[in-house]
Image: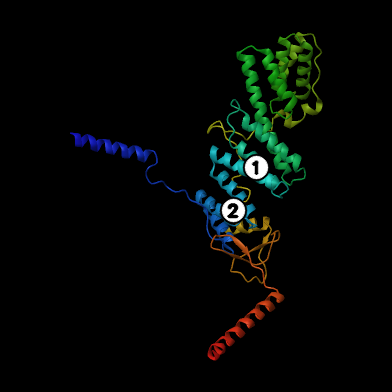
Amino acid sequence: MKVVKALILAVGIASLLGACGGGTKTKSKVAIEEAKAGRDRELFKTAIGDIRDGHEDAGRMELNTIINTYPDSPLVKASKLAMSDSFYLEGGSKNLAQAEAGYREFLQFFPDDPLGDSVMLKMAEIHMRQLMAPDRDPTHAKQAEHQLKELLRLHPDTPMKPEVEGRIREIQEYLAEHEMKVARFYYDLRQAPEATRQRTEEILNKYPNYSKFDEALYYHAKSMADQEDTETASQDLVRIIKEYPHSDYSDKARVLLKKWNKPVPDPDPAKATDPAAANKAFVPRFFSFVFGPKVNNLSSKGVIIDRTLKTEEIVSRAQELSGVKETPGATGPPGVSTSTNARDNRPRRTTGAGQDVEVKPGSPASQDKSSSKDKKKDSKSDKSPDSSNNN
């Protein structure tokens, strides 16, 4: 019995040590290798191919190798962007957060880069991909709106300006719908006119292009009337009749104005004959009520990586954006590239430690000195046998 107890105790101690890390630990992969000429381009091409085929982890390991082993490579900048693209393309809240952090770091290091506007748009799309229904937390929508407005502020002449302005309208439609849902809740269910006033004024002041602006005016008018401010309420109702003659709230506005002995205006003739006013053409593209809330028409491409392109096309585009070009008459192995913005184009060799070491060609003077030293050594070696014989 004592032997059995001893065995059980030994097994328990061994299990405890294993759980505490006493066993063999799995070593994490480290992206380190010996630097070789042209290897950075090979790694970049392999990484793009892996990410394009859905092997994001392998691609990120190869990109890390470029960043760690070839810090002076012109492809480092493209590698950082490709790294963020890999997280964006993989998706998921954690990966999208990693992508945003990578894009933000890129903008900090390269604030004047030509791809800055594309990176900022991608950061906005990260938040747009995470939008929930309008009655949920609008944090992502507000962050996307801020990012898009900041893009236009920093890049007013960007060729993507029409797309960015369209995205801002979509985001503002979403935010206005959020405020309208809350306003309906406070007025219809809670009978809280002051809370309704605050929510509708948010719409009236910030989102003039909201597709249900007439509804916001009507609820604002009702909330003000409930607080005995029929003057402000009348102004809202007059605006509904003039600017939204085809609105469902137009007849209700006339009834209330007559009830308060206020003059009822005629509709604006231009608005009355405008077919767009009769049929609200703007339909938000944000969510599907069948398949759940969803943002449509967002790009499935990264800043650099486009899975609809071939690997070579993506690599060529990345090299062009990085200022890399093939050097005519280069003596290096195939695939070796030089950069127009490289700090030093002199020949380099590698050591066993994986570091670049500058190879400086010898000057004529140093060559003369070395040859004179060799001659002295030869003369000494010639004299030594004779002297031994004489002795």
183 lies above or below 340: above
**Residue 247 visible to the viewer:** no
Residue at image mark 1: 104
27 up-or-down from 140: above or below: below
Q: Which residue is mark 2?
A: 67
Closer to the camera, 82 or 1?
A: 1
**Snapshot quadrant of residue 150:** top right
Q: What x and y, as percent, mark residue 340? A: 71, 61
Figure colour scheme: rainbow
Q: In the image, what residue occupies the spot 53% across and 32% down? A: 290
Local secondary structure at mark 2:
helix
- The image quadrant where one finds the C terminus is bottom right
Question: In the drawing, does residue 152 fall left or right of residue 15?
Answer: right
**Secondary structure state at the residue bearing disc 1:** helix
Residue furthest out toward the front: 391
Where is residue 69 shown, x and y percent of the image?
57, 56
Q: Residue furthest left?
A: 1
**In front: 226, or 98?**
98
Whichever of labels 1 and 2 marks the residue nearer the N terminus, that label is 2
- Name the foreground residue: 218 vs 123: 123
Q: Position of residue 45 (x, y in %)?
A: 56, 58
Query: Quadrant location of residue 334?
Result: bottom right
Residue type, numbered disc 1: Arg
The answer, for residue 39, to whether it is visible in the render is: yes
Return the x and y of residue 217 as percentages of the image width and height. Answer: 72, 20
Q: Amino acid at mark 2?
A: Ile
Q: Is residue 84 above or below residue 70?
A: above
Q: Which residue is located at x 61 percent, y 50 percent?
A: 80
